[in-house]
Each structure stands twice: as C-alpha cells, then as structure tokens.
Image: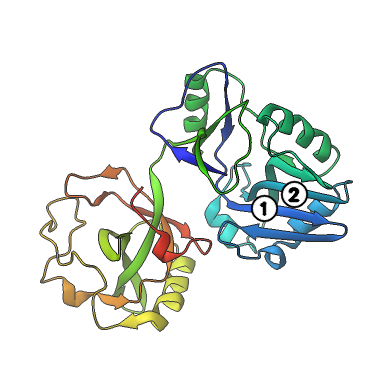
Amino acid sequence: MLATAADVLPVGREWTYEIKWDGYRALALKDGAAIRLISRNQKNLTADYPTVVAALKTINEKAVLLDGEIVALDGNGRPSFQALQHRSTQGLALTYVAFDVLTIGRRSFLTEPLSARRTRLAALLAGTPVMQSEPLPGAPEEIERAIREFGLEGVVAKRSDSTYRPGQRTDAWVKVKFSPRQEFVVGGYKSNGRSIDSVVVGYYEGRRLLFAAQVRNGFTPHIRAELRQRLEPLIVKACPFANLPNSVGRSHWGSGITAEDMAKFQWVTPREVVEVAFVEWTLDNVLRHPRFIAFRDDKRARDVRKA
C-alpha cells in the first residue's frame, strides 16, 4: 500500500501521524524458522540483513507477514539512508521498523481498520527487538515542528479507519516531506583527475530522459570512489538526455549545461539511481542547490519520474 504525496499534513480527528522512516521499504515474511525480506520491486533482501532476520525470528507466531522498513540508526538514533548502504560503519544500528501486520497464520487483517491492526502489531512485537512505528503525539503543527527540529525527512499521515489495499496508492495514507528530495537517474559525470567531481541527473517523461541538475555536493571520498566503480562500466559516447544542452547556463544556480560544456562530461547508460535533496525546482525546471543523499538500488531507472 502506497501513500499519496502532499505539501501539508491533513488535519482531522481520524488522522494519525508517523515518522517517515528513511530506509528500505520491505515486506517481512516469517514462515516457521524461515524469514524473507522482499523490497517494493520484488528484490530479495534477506541475505543482506542477517541482524534484521535474527530479530524477526524472535516473533513467537509461526507465520506472519509484516509491512515496514529496514532502517539504519546513527549514533543519535536518527534514521540514515546513507548509513544503511554502508553497513560496515561502526556504531550503526540496523533494525526493522514495522508499521503494519497483514497476516498472522492463515488469518488476514487487510480489511480491519488501521487502529485494530496497530493493536495486533503491538502484541505481536512485544518482547522482541523489532521496532513498531507508533503514532506521534501532539497536534499536526507540533509534530511538524518537532520533525523539522530533529532533522527527519517527513511524516506519513494515516487514517485510523483505513483498510490495507495492496499495490494501491491511496489518499488514506498521505506522505509529506519537509526537505524536498527524490530519486534521479544518473546520465553522466565530470571527472576531476582520478575522482568524480559531479554527476548529471534526470528523470523520465515517457521514454525521454530529461535533465534535472548537475550535482556537486554531498559526496564523501568513499562515495566518489563508489561512483567511479559503478559508472565507468556504463560509459557511452552519446548524451542520454533529450534536453541537453539547455539554455540555462551558469546564471541560474549554476545547474545548466551549455553546448560548450558538453565535451567536459562523460556520458553513461542511464541505469544507476540516486536520491538527491534540494531546495526547490526553479522556473527553468532544474534543481536549486542539489545534494547527493544516497544510492537507490531498490529503484529502477525507468520508474523514476518527476515527483
């Protein structure tokens, strides 16, 4: 079940609010001693997260199906998607945060209201290391203020009477991001000696890949090395972006690429997906102050659209 994006939190007695966890969305299936973690694009993540699997095995019920996210918590207890991708980082806490229970044994709870499913989930997880995403206390404006102060990505508002509708994007769940960010496809990069200086990213509109930004910020030395490793095998001669060069130039936030600039870039097959934070979309339809957040191996390039 997917949430509808919105700019502001809905208000009303029927609405509840949860943290928007910055992790990998995954179904967790327990069948006896066997555990499976399945991503949104049906990728099997089980072997990648043995500590999460071990935690899920502690659930007493023989067979359960949960919906939630695999989350990495940094030293301050904040979810970090970038940390999730580098699981060898010292002090990293990996956990599964469950926000829904879909089945227990042969019984389905899809048609029960969310309030009832939360009660079932709390009882199911009691005494286990698996976390539950619980409703946040306070009024919407208080919740938003606290989430912003803690530097978290956003909030998911859910109607307490909502049933679970698999595969549907519904307005019974509404996600609000307080710091704009989304996935983009990498179509090129610029080198600085043996290091990658920046990447060129875009999104699909139909079959066309459209330029969104040249991203220079947010790269650690480790990420620059991984970018080179990922992108060098994908090198092609032709630019994959349908709208480059463009006429934006350097006067509009420095994000444009002119005809003169084109020869400075190495183009690649648009396969790698990254998450980018930014201030806003400009009137020229490019990102203002883009910043790399993380690789998104759970997203397919062809599915990336402008949010």
Quarter of the view holding residue 124 = top right
Mark 1 or mark 2: whose residue is earlier in sequence? 1
Task: Give the residue at x 40% y 65%.
Answer: 302
- Residue 136 at x, y = what percent? 61, 26
Q: Are marks 1 and 2 in contact (CB under 8 Å)?
A: yes
- Regarding residue 80, the answer to whether it shows in the image is yes
The numbered disc on residue 64 is none
Left or right placement of residue 214 versus residue 229 in this view? left
SS for dot 1:
strand
- Circle 2 residue: 65
SS for dot 2:
strand
Left or right placement of residue 59 versus residue 172 in this view? right
Q: How far apart are labels 1 and 2 at the CA level? A: 7 Å
Q: Nearer the viewer, residue 71 or 26?
A: 26
Q: Amino acid at mark 1?
A: Leu
Task: Give the residue at x 31% y 78%.
Answer: 193
Task: Give the residue at x 67% y 29%.
Answer: 113
